[in-house]
Image (cartoon, helix red, strand yellow):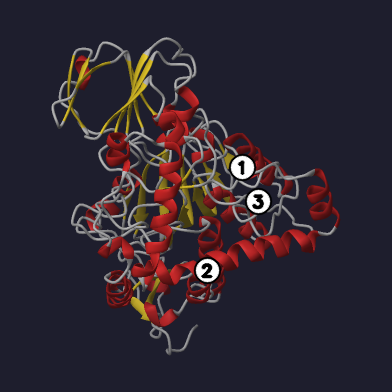
Amino acid sequence: MAAERESDSGRVGGNDGAGEREHVRVAVIGSGFGGLGAAVRLRRAGITDFVVLERRDSVGGTWRDNSYPGCACDVPSHLYSFSFAPNPEWPRTFSGQRHIRAYLEGVADTFGLRPHLRLSTEVHRMTWDTEEFHWVIETERATLTADFVVSATGPLSDPKIPDIPGLDTFEGKVFHSAQWDHDYDLRGKRVAMVGTGASAIQIVPSIAPETERLTVFQRTAPWVMPRVDRRITGPERWLHGRVPVTGTLRRGVLWGIRELQVGAFTKRPEQLGLVEKLASRHMTKSISDPELRRKLTPDYRIGCKRILLSNAYYPALARPDVDVVASGLKEVRGSTLVAADGTETEADAIIFGTGFHVTDMPIADRIKGADGTTLAEAWRDGMKALRGCTAVGFPNFMTVIGPNTGLGNSSMILMIESQLNYMVDYLRQLDTFGGRAAFEPRAAAVDAWNDHVQDRMERTVWSTGGCDSWYLDANGRNTTVWPGTTGEFRRLTRRLDLSEYDVRRAPSPAPAEASADAPAVGGTALAAAGEERP
């Protein structure tokens, strides 16, 4: 990689709002895969005037926060890493949390990102200044401004605990899987696991041998497939390190297999019947009790919810000291947990594996656009963004892993890298206008994109499979998943199309300086694609 020169990031002191504020060209919010990936791409594009704002004291995003027992990825290691930062030393075909977190720390070091990191710096409010044409970002440490903002907080960053009547009266320990209390000893305790999603199926086998009794509250039975995991041998690691093309080839094969699967999810869900049979056979091998098998058999098409991978989950549920309550938790009365079907359970601790605020991300309440509307208000009827990146009313702002960019069967790193291509081209084209300029997506373009995505969504397994998943928002619309291949998404985000944007200029400094042929001011449209650029 070519040598990169650090530029002056506009650091001029004053972090309490008084005097001059620090100004940067780009501010990135979050330091998970999306945030660190954005930082690397900025540097490789020759942009070094940026900061990465991270609310915690280290990088890693969801792979820092989720440290529960058994935490691991359900995407193969060589596909769950940046294409520009291959790791020949992955120890297993499916990596654990600590190895993924170490990988992200390594990315921060290898690509010289540490000077750009502002750790323990949570964004409290962010407002578009219509006069100065930049974002004003208020954090717990300082107030700074930025010409362009990338929100890479991710949808799996804010844990969601359901509002359970009486939960505040519970006499024991309560925590979410993403906020694991490592100081609390589960040994000899009566523990309730609420939820049966991707985290829970890893937690249950890990803690079942320690607890006195483990009760799993299952609102909906998941489809579980075998996890084909193994140790990556020394010769394999040596080969990938000495002959990098072999690692690239391995990644390509993993990617290609998953691309071929997309049609069954998005166009022909009936083809998933064979997969259901394999999953049922997987359960039958471990569960001999007919009643328990009935509880664990899903009543919806496989793929409607995320397909889970585990070899240990079913054997753990078959243990004599593990109970499955096929009903959600409805109420808490002291130390007694009451399920929706009336089942009562005594517990010393409750662990919630109930997911995250995905379609109602809290960061959206903190971002105020050009007309004073927050992103949460703009998305009140459902999230929507042009190519999953930009929203109406929010100039020079984009999200990474935005609306309808999630995946049900492949690696999110592929989608992130596609959006980073879009980011780099956005900034490149913005540069051609010089001075203080901004792009804002046209409402018609956003609506056309969203309508197209939702039309395609109607025939997918996520819409026809008969389940109620976290992919859906409060209105029952799937605003989370991408209904196509990752290759298609990459083509659609390779370049920013100016015909989908209004180009705006900052107001002139003073009326006397404005010429007769000056561009439109005050936030009015300067040009659309096809019009002559300055």
Does dot 2 land on a helix, a strand or a loop? helix
Callout 3 crowding tier (Cα within 10 Å): few <14, some 14–19, many ≥20: few
Give the residue pinned by disc 3: 8
Q: Which mark is residue 385?
A: none
Give the residue pinned by disc 2: 259
Q: Nearer the viewer, residue 502 or 104?
A: 104
**Left or right of residue 234: residue 172:** left
How far, Cα to Cα, is label 1 from label 3? 38 Å
Residue 30 position within the rendered picture, expressed as x and y whole percent measured from the top left? 49, 45
Callout 1 crowding tier (Cα within 10 Å): few <14, some 14–19, many ≥20: many
Sequence-first tag of 3 and 2: 3
Residue flagged by tag 1: what amino acid is it? Ser
Residue flagged by tag 2: what amino acid is it? Glu
Residue flagged by tag 3: what amino acid is it? Asp
How far, Cα to Cα, is label 3 from label 2? 43 Å
Q: Quadrant of residue 529?
A: bottom left
Q: Nearer the viewer, mark 3 or mark 2?
A: 2
Give the residue pinned by disc 1: 95
Q: Nearer the viewer, residue 265 or 96?
A: 265
**Left or right of residue 69: residue 526:** left
